[in-house]
Amino acid sequence: MKAVKEDGKEGSALFSLADINAALAKAQISPVQHLYTTEFPYADRPLVLLDLHDRRALVDWEQRSVVWSQPKDTAASAEDWEPTSRNLAFVRAHNLYVTDSSGRTTAVSSDGSLDIEYGESVHRDEFGITKGTFWSPKGQRLAFYRMDQSMVTKYPQVDISARCAALDPDPYPMAGETSHEVSVGIFDVQTQQTVYLQTGNPKDRYFTNLAWSPDEQTLYLIELNRDQNHATLDAYDARTGQKIKMLLEERNEKYVEPLHPIQFLPWDATKFVYLTRNRDGWNHLFLGLTPRTPSPKGEGVTNLTKGDFEVIDLLGFNEKDKTIIYTSNEDDPIGCAVYSVDMKGHRKRISAKEGWHNASLSPAGSYIVDNWTWGGNAKCGRMIDLYPTNGKGRPISSEEGARGMRLLTAPEPWADFAVPEIRVGTLKAADGVTDLYYRLVLPTDFDPSKQYPAIVYVYGGPHAHNIDSSRHYGVRGWDVWMAQKGYVMFCLDNRGSEHRGLAFEQATFRRLGVEEMKDQMRGVEFLKSLPYVDASRLGVHGWSFGGFMTTSLMTTYPDVFRVGVAGGPVIDWKYYEVMYGERYMDTPQQNPEGYAETSLLAKAGDLQGRLLLIYGGNDPTCVPQHTLSFIRASIDAGTHPDLFTYPGDGHNMMGTDRVHLHEHISRYFDDHLK
């Protein structure tokens, strides 16, 4: 492993696999086979972290010695290691444990079960939640989730791997039904005591975006009501669990969706940055104040970024220059570039304007490592740049705005293959005003005098997009494969998809699929206008929300689409889970007309073309009841969709099953559309 100097030149080797294994051998630790999972937890110390099968170890690469190691519980899950204290939180059998740096393990809970879970992700991974433990800055306190699911109806998943198939129940709260109850605890490593936040009633609320104050004395979180139209940012005393103050409050007549915890300014612990789209309809950075300064309902909260664009992610801070580093689509609605903003709101782009940039920030925020691709550069697979966040230095090649040095220019890996032409453009949405982006992939050896079958690949739901400025404009390998087989492949990001502002997303509220289909049909009209598209041979395919859209299009426009393949489809939103379903549809009790209009069960009799439905036999996201209910409705209506299942798989197929899946989808189109 080698270092790169600030001038972009390759430095000397830090260590080799042999060096690491020699150090491990001296400590009587088994050798490692590769260095893929090494981490560097300390910016100012020559220590590399090795996450081994049975332990963690810190190796000093200069001294070639193990300076610390800690055994691991091989039955543990949800491990969360904190580098300052070297304390470890983990879950075993739904109970939470903490092992300190000396190796002492404490059981934080003892009543964990399928019904009661500690330290695990809650609210079905909605609201930006991906885990269930949150260490304080120095690792002396651990905030964690406790989830009580005892009142939630269990969906009867079946485990067929057993000699006699057995029930494998999954607590699954469907829209409008009883949901789980979550509480937030704080475990103090030094006192070995646990307190719970005194959040009060009602119980069926959502707690998300946990954040610690720099002094570890205060825990911040966003509390969201079940209707998801009212959110508050609240501060709690980490020692007592008592509420200190509400800092911010947000309301929206449709929904509020907090996705990002606050982040404190490294140079001023009384101020924090808050990322929200609910204040002006676009995802922007705001500067807020801690409880020491009065701001009961958001007074004093100021915009740091403004405009009709979205801040995509907050990367961190340049402590010396007192600037915030973030990514945004300000210069390209389907792009993602790197910017900085100071405390007066002065913005500056510091990466290249083009492409999709996946950037990581140095600990002090002075430098960016930028791993990026650009659909307009067909000769390059990807680039890696190193540049200062102050925007100074020599230009990188000819990229506008980028100053630093190029570390890598990877050749295009498809350069020696017959790659189809990929076009990107815009067309108007069904509202006649909004621009929508599409991607068109032409068949290999395209002949404009011929007519080709066309397939619409669709997703269409929130929190996702298909077309962006990354390599080949985000095209999927399957689309390219099908183009090589002689299909025109088309994709459109309709209203409701991400990174286009709140109004763009909320256009679908309470009627999921309705406006989305109107937009998709504008895309179909465009396809039909192309002289090389055979309008009598149109297909459609999508997965999850895309499976819902595929089935919706096949049954709503049966004279348009000849063939469809719907994977893991939502069929009726009343079968979907509480958090996602109620955010976009409200409850079936509140919105019976919307649920009835968007249910596909009543449309089963309208099916005319060939429709294949595919689902994972143990799908915990879009449960099998969706697909099976549509098959039942089709039988009752006298229509004949096809059905295929992957026993034991979840919402997505992985490994060789995924290869089989795409072979199966392709064969279906070859058999019935080509």
Image (tube, grey):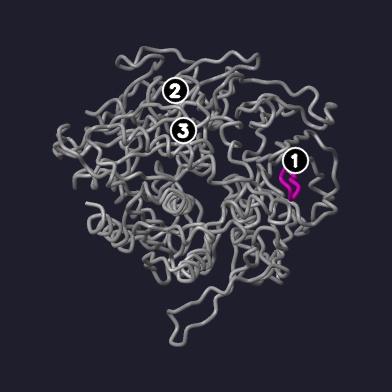
Say which of 343 and 85 sits in front.
343
659 vs 191, left or right, is: left
Gap between marks 1 and 2 measured at Cα: 31 Å
Quadrant position of residue 287: top right
Quadrant position of residue 272: top right
Q: Are marks 1 and 3 in contact (CB under 8 Å)?
A: no
Residue pointed to by mark 2: 332
Placement of 312 over or under 174, stated as above or below: above
Q: Residues within 10 Å of mark 2 (few under 14, many from 20)?
A: some
Q: Disc number at residue 231?
A: 1
- Magenta residue span: 223-230
Gap between marks 1 and 3 measured at Cα: 30 Å
Sequence-earlier tag: 1 or 3: 1
Q: Disc number at residue 360?
A: 3
User: How far across and down, in percent of the image, does residue 375 sit?
Assistant: 32, 29
Which residue is found at the position 25% from the left and 43% from the top? Answer: 480
User: How far across and down, in percent of the image, does residue 15 sit?
Assistant: 33, 43
Say which of 374 and 238 sits in front.
374
State the SS at label 3. strand
